[in-house]
Amino acid sequence: MIIQICVGSSCHLKGSYEIVEMLTKMIEEHQLENEISLAGSFCIGKCNREGVTVQVDDEICVGITRNNLKEFFNDKVLAAIKSEGK
């Protein structure tokens, strides 16, 4: 699984660095370092949205904030990994 966090100007101002740090910790806590590739990305094109834009494989998710990151991680990351049988 590839997770890309937008680090373009708009998302940077909305806290993308903090989202990267929090996601890194969540990945480590669940021991998913070998399952997930975490990367920064330039603008994904959803700058007019609230929060940070995050792409999980081919799915673009908008409005990711520190307040909803855990829900995002559970729904989009852990659920996908479990459905793959890992």
Image (cartoon, rainbow, N blue to C red):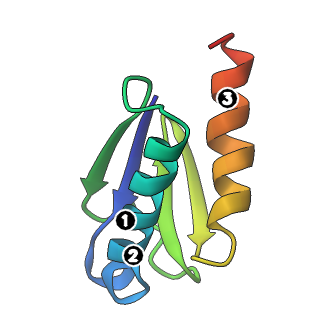
Q: Which residue is labeled 2 in the image?
A: 18
* Residue highlighted by disc 1: 21
Residue 46 is at least partly visible in this image: yes
Image position of 26 with respect to 48: above or below? above
Mark 1 surroundings: few (<14), some (14-19) or many (≥20) residues within 10 A? few
Q: Which mark is residue 86?
A: none
Q: Residue at x 48, y 49 (%)?
A: 55
Q: CA distance from mark 2 to mark 3?
A: 23 Å
Q: Give x and y (percent) for residue 83.
A: 74, 19
**Dot 1 amino acid type:** Glu
In the image, which disc is placed on residue 80?
3
Query: For the point 74% across and 59% down, which residue is it?
Result: 71
**x%, y% of residue 81?**
63, 25
- Residue 10 percent coordinates (x, y): 35, 84
User: Which of 33 and 43 lies nearest the eye of the viewer?
Assistant: 33
At mark 1, the secondary structure is: helix
* Quarter of the view holding residue 41: bottom left
Q: Tell whether 21 sits left or right of 27.
A: left
Determine the secondary structure under disc 3: helix
Is residue 27 or residue 58 the one in the foreground? 27
The amino acid type, in three-letter code, at marker 3 is Ala
CA distance separating discs 1 and 2: 5 Å
